Image (cartoon, rainbow, N blue to C red):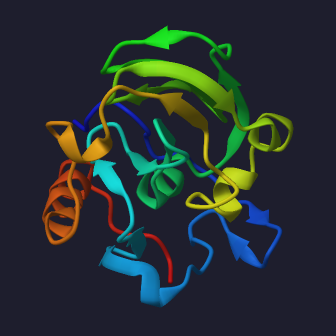
């Protein structure tokens, strides 16, 4: 039995950019701190392995939140992103929106309390942006937060990323994204 959050889908789609749903788009290898079972994790972010989200400091007082490459690999295909409204105050460990997949709907949870100041309209209009660029154009929401991700318990950064996601992948019986 796996963990809550993104779950593997079935089937296989080919996406713009020449990769399919079981492989991930390439990212700048100089920016990667960990590569676990074919999933890249850029070094400039903090990660929550259970929620399959990343956080990165944005403009002063804001934090950007998105789905990890691992979450994208598990989900396979995104049909819709339904964010909560801008101005919504969210507590830590609560949903900032929903992602509709082929056979299920999953909550996108934040490990950080804050107020949603923006959601990514590009992902709302074209959900496969998540598959194409989960660490860039595929971000999900921006939060105004009292605390930065470096102060949140449960987030991993740097050398701790590989071990945390290796364990998460083991629990989910994830064999790996295709190279």
Expressed as whole percent of the image width and height from the top left, the position of residue 112 reads: 33, 28
Judge left or right: residue 46 versus residue 62: left
Name the residue nearer the viewer: 142 or 36: 142
Foreground of the two, 167 or 33: 33
Q: Position of residue 159 (x, y in %)?
A: 15, 72
Is any atom of residue 168 visible in this view? yes
Return the x and y of residue 120 as percentages of the image width and height.
72, 38
The relative height of residue 97 versus residue 44 in the rendered view (above or below) is above
Residue at 69%, 22% (x, y): give it: 82
Place residue 68 in its image quadrant: bottom left
Residue 130 lies left or right of residue 46; in this view the side is right
Q: Decide if residue 89 is on the left or right side of residue 11.
A: left
Image-based side of 111 in relation to 138, left or right:
left
* As drawn, 112 above or below 19: above
Compared to residue 178, the image places residue 59 above or below, namely above
The residue that appears at 57% across and 72% down in the rendered structure is 23
Q: What residue is drawn where x is 17% and y is 57%? A: 164
Front position in the image: 73 or 148: 148
Q: In which image quadrant can residue 80 be found? A: top right
Tell me if residue 12 can be seen. no
Which residue is at the far bottom?
30
Q: Residue at x 19, y 40 (%)?
A: 151
């Amino acid at each position: 039995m796996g963990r809550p959050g993104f779950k593997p889908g079935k089937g296989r789609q080919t996406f713009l950019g020449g990769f399919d749903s079981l492989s991930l788009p390439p990212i700048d290898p100089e920016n990667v701190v960990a590569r676990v079972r074919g999933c890249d994790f850029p070094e400039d972010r903090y990660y929550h392995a259970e929620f399959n989200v990343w956080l990165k400091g944005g403009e002063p007082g804001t934090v950007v939140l998105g789905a990890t490459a691992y979450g994208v690999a598990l989900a396979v295909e995104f049909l819709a992103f339904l964010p909560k409204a801008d101005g919504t105050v969210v507590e830590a460990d609560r949903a900032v929106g929903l992602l509709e997949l082929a056979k299920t709907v999953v909550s996108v949870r934040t490990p950080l309390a804050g107020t949603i100041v923006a959601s990514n309209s590009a992902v709302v209009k074209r959900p496969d942006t998540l598959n194409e660029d989960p660490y860039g154009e595929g971000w999900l929401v921006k939060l105004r937060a009292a605390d930065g991700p470096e102060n949140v318990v449960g987030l991993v950064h740097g050398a701790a990323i590989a071990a945390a996601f290796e364990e998460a992948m083991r629990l989910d019986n994830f064999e790996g994204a295709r190279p």
